[in-house]
Image: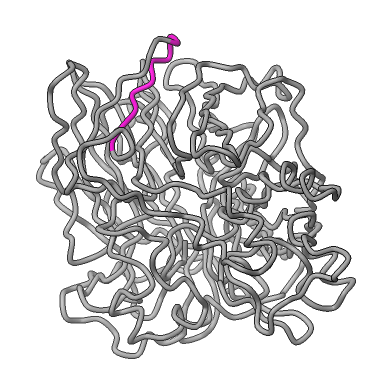
Amino acid sequence: MARGTVRMPAACAATMAANVATTIAAMVGVANRTAAVGLLCLVLLSAVTAAPPPLQATAGEGSSEDIGYNLLFETSTDEFSDRCVELPKALPPWAEGNFIIPSIGQFEMGGRSFVGFGDAFGKLHRFSVAGSQVCATYRLMATGFRNESMKADTVGPGLLFYETEPPRRCPELDPVCNLVAPNDNTFVNTIHHGGQLLSLTDSPAMLAIDAITLGVIGKHTWKDELGGKMDYTGSAHPLRHPASGEWIDFVAEGSLISKGATVRLFSLQDDNPSVRAGLTRIEMDSAPYMHSFGVTAHYIVLPRMPVEFDAANLLEVALGKRSMSQLFVEIDLTEPSAKNGFYLVPLDGSAPLVRPLPVDDRLFYTHVINAYEIGDNVIIDIATSPRNAFSGDLTIKTAMDKAKRDAGEAAPRFTVRRFTIPLKEGSLVKAQPLSDPRSSIDFPSINARFEGKRHCFFWGVKWFADFHTQASMAITKQDVCGNGGGELQWSRKNWYPSQPTVLPVPGEEASEDEAMLVFTALDGAKGESYLVLLNASTMESISEVGPFPRIGFTTHGNFYTSPSSEVAK
């Protein structure tokens, strides 16, 4: 994310809640129009220039001005198709393809403004490279939410993390208009499945996207019986099984009567794209929120935060009595519990192993880096925080207030931690930090060939690179195997990068960090965005592609290689 404060976009939360709308709508006697998910679509190269060596962030050198940082939270409605440039030197064939990344594009409409920046209208970007030509496309997402808002010339009905300013009001004859709205403004992640580009967030629903026009085709239809009566969440980060290559994800069904939930894990096969093949199911005594998870050769690793989704009070959100942010409730713990720890779910369908953490080690997290098995242990590396990320002030106003964001009022600092989870009953989970807690590292990436296997490197976005300023940002490379590499990083003063995507050099003989990093970065001083290519081993710039019109606050980018490439992901 060229992101500054929140680690979990409100689009995730709103879409989760929208999936509960079917049940509540039936209770109050109205029709529901489904909840879906938003997307990201293609962004890679355009106008390349030779770049100077990377600047190393040093403690105490942070900008006191954060020039242009607030542009991440201002409307950028530029739309165009196939704006092409010629590169002075073509990239290697394995680097041909499309980089897809979404952003938040529009923060107001018709005199009404969003309060939470994750609620704003999504936007897609595509940068496509073939040979020495790069073509870019920007498109605001034509979701049902935005289309209906356009018709009304104001922010239309829908579930939001924070109510707009001035507030919306449902008609007296349609008091739950926000519940029955399209609720499809989702733009967190994408996968390619069964020949179709799909967008997804923390929701059971996925949207089909036209990869050329960036148009929203519609909701992806499942032709199976996996779904429940009140499915409220999934994960925005499905993973490939390290052996079979099938996508693995889950859907959780909650209840308006009890706090319990059923988590159904499934796989997706490309030759049967409309069917979710059930793997196993887990009963939990409260409704979990799990943004990401891990997969090893034999286990699905579910990190369980001490936070539960309060679906029973969703109707009060619809009636304006509560905000969506109040539905993520921290669980009070007095002893080690399955509500704070790990579920190791065997892929063979046998009973899960539950490994709780100590009461004073509360597992607040966003993104799993990787998980793998060593001997009688499962290892998982996670970006963790000292407090519930939802408990901060996730508004645009705070995101744009330097004093508040530097004081941590919006988001905590994230530390990458390694957890060693024993397979043997009775043994304790061990934890160790992998990053400096004075900075904040999240939005990690690894070489996809090492997913589910022992890895030695990860790359990610660093905030507080100077230890003092949230907008002091860098792209970091971390050596977690102690090979003497330490940490390398790329940064520029007043530049704000997105999550790096790792594009590995093809061939089994290639080393783990023999790869190219691809990400976008906003030049705050000029108000322009670039696509940056780095040598993943040395963190030196290969080229900068741009300038392009400004791209705002982004989520997760993915690189989709061309059919001729040997490293299609």
Identify the residue shown where x is 39% and y is 48%.
307
Q: Left or right of 171: which side holds 387? A: left
The quarter of the picture where residue 437 lies is bottom left
Identify the residue shown where x is 31% and y is 33%.
338
Task: Please state the horizontal and vertical placement of residue 348, each as a whole percent of the image.
Answer: 43, 9
In the displayed structure, 10 sits above or below 380; it is below
Identify the residue shown where x is 71% and y is 20%.
225
Q: Main secondary structure of the magenta part?
A: strand
- State how many labels appear: 0
Task: Please state the horizontal and vertical placement of residue 566, each as a whole percent of the image.
Answer: 53, 29
Which of the pair 484/302 is nearer the observer? 302
Q: Left or right of 410: which side holds 157? A: right
Task: Please state the horizontal and vertical placement of residue 209, each as a whole percent of the image.
Answer: 75, 45
The quarter of the picture where residue 468 lies is bottom left
Which of the pair 131/548 is nearer the observer? 548
Task: Please state the horizontal and vertical placement of residue 434, each as a whole percent of the image.
Answer: 17, 48
The colour mode here is one colour
Q: Residue furthest front?
A: 257
Which of the pair 46/503 is nearer the observer? 503
Q: Left or right of 432: which side holds 563? A: right
Is residue 278 visible in the rendered image? The answer is yes
The quarter of the picture where residue 10 lies is bottom right
Write down the region rendered in magenta. Answer: 341-349
Tell whether position 365 is magenta: no
Tell whether position 343 is magenta: yes
Q: Left or right of 228: which side holds 351? A: left
Identify the residue shown where x is 25% and y is 70%.
465
Is residue 133 visible in the rendered image? The answer is no
